Amino acid sequence: MEVILVKDVKGLGSEGDVVKVADGYARNYLIPKGLALQATKANLRILKNEMETMETKAQKELGKAEKTAEQLEHSRVTIRCKAGEGGKLFGSVTAKDIAEAVQESLGIALDRRRIDLTEPIKAVGSYTVSVKLHQEVSTKISVEVEPQPEGDL
């Protein structure tokens, strides 16, 4: 019997695959558990339409990520933190701080998990941080960490 997998099934295939399985396996396990649908003409047509929709959505997301990458590529973000002698920060600058600074200065919302910061920034200076916007799109952003003036608390 041919079935269309609705979810990933280990050892059988991934979502959207049309696979041939034993009749009993399909009727007694895959279909009742909601892991597969019988591969009828109607279901295959629905699958084709859903795949086209998902592909269109993925292309839109890729285009949006590329546009955001262009905006971020040559931009500079400044973060002011309390610093002690020698430019050492009290605390550190994390991916969350960078995401907030980008939102505030450029108006671009970034997920902090997309910012590739191997370890927190703990000193004043200029840093280049990579940002992964999409599976295929990543860019670099310049982060300038400056000491906060004494009067601003």
Image (spheres, helix red, strand yellow):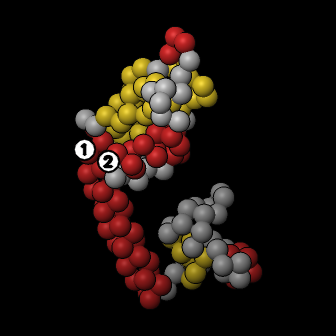
Query: Which residue is at a point 32% across and 68% down the rendered structure image?
Result: 56
Image spot of residue 132 (x, y percent) = 42, 42
Mark drawn on residue 62:
none
Q: Residue at x 46, y 20 (%)?
A: 124
Q: For the residues marked 2 and 1, what is the alpha-carbon distance in whole angstroms?
A: 12 Å
Callout 1: 10 Å neighbours few (<14), some, many (20+)?
A: few
Q: Is residue 110 left or right of residue 7?
A: left
How packed is label 2: few (under 14 Cα within 10 Å), some, or many (20 or more)? some
Seen from the viewer's position, the closer of residues 58 and 81 is 81
Q: Which residue is mark 2?
A: 106
In terms of secondary structure, where does tag 2 sit?
Answer: helix
Left or right of 64: which side holds 129?
right
Residue placed at 66% from the left, 58% from the top?
10
Please indicate whether residue 132 sits to the left or right of residue 106 in the image: right
Hey, what amino acid is under mark 1? Glu
Q: x, y percentage for residue 20?
A: 57, 71
* Residue most extreme to the top: 86
Most foreground residue, 16 or 88: 88
Q: Earlier in the sequence, mark 2 or mark 1?
A: 1
Determine which quarter of the picture holds residue 45.
bottom left
Label 1 SS: helix
* Residue type at the position of mark 2: Leu
User: From where the camera sits, is residue 118 visible?
Assistant: no
Residue located at (46% from left, 39% from top): 98
The percent coordinates of residue 135 (x first, y second) are: 42, 47
Q: In front: mark 2 or mark 1?
A: 2
Q: Is residue 84 above or below residue 3?
A: above
Q: What label sits on residue 70 in the rendered view?
A: 1
